[in-house]
Amino acid sequence: MQQHQYENYRHLGLNIAYYRKSKGLSQSRLAELVNISRTHMSRIETAECAVSLDVVFDLCKALEIKPMQLFDFRI
């Protein structure tokens, strides 16, 4: 992840966490649904790593939301 994009990844992670919690899912369960580790899921939500679009699209499918919802940053 490029450092100048950190805030965007942070907002993305916050949105993922928001929708995950609104569905009543744990990080572990959501990670299972998208076939990634719970540690990777945590790192995505806390902006400790970049995330591929493949994973973003899988997250959207699992959360039953549109990708644009994850990128609607409430600043």
Image: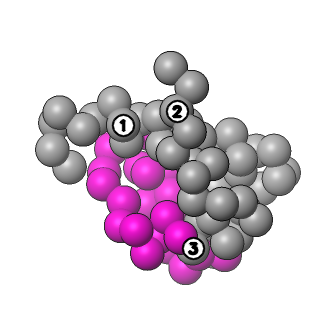
Lower sequence index among marks 1 and 2: 1
In x, y percent, where is residue 75? 50, 20
Residue span colored magenta:
33-57
Q: Is residue 68 above or below residue 36?
A: above
Do tag 1 and tag 3 residues touch (Cβ < 8 Å)? no
Q: Which residue is mark 2?
A: 73
Instruction: Residue at 55%, 79% (x, y): give it.
Output: 35
Residue 9: % across, % down:
37, 41
Q: Can residue 71 be seen at all in this image of the molecule?
A: yes
Q: CA distance from mark 1 to mark 3?
A: 19 Å
Q: Which residue is mark 1?
A: 8
User: Which residue is nearer to you in this view: 73 or 14?
Assistant: 73
Give the amino acid type for the residue marked by disc 3 in the picture. Asp
Inspect the image, locate mark 2, and give the three-letter code of the amino acid beneath it: Phe
Percent position of residue 72, x then y? 56, 39
Secondary structure category for the residue under label 3: helix
The amino acid marked with disc number 1 is Asn
Residue 67 position within the rendered picture, expressed as x and y whole percent measured from the top left = 57, 59
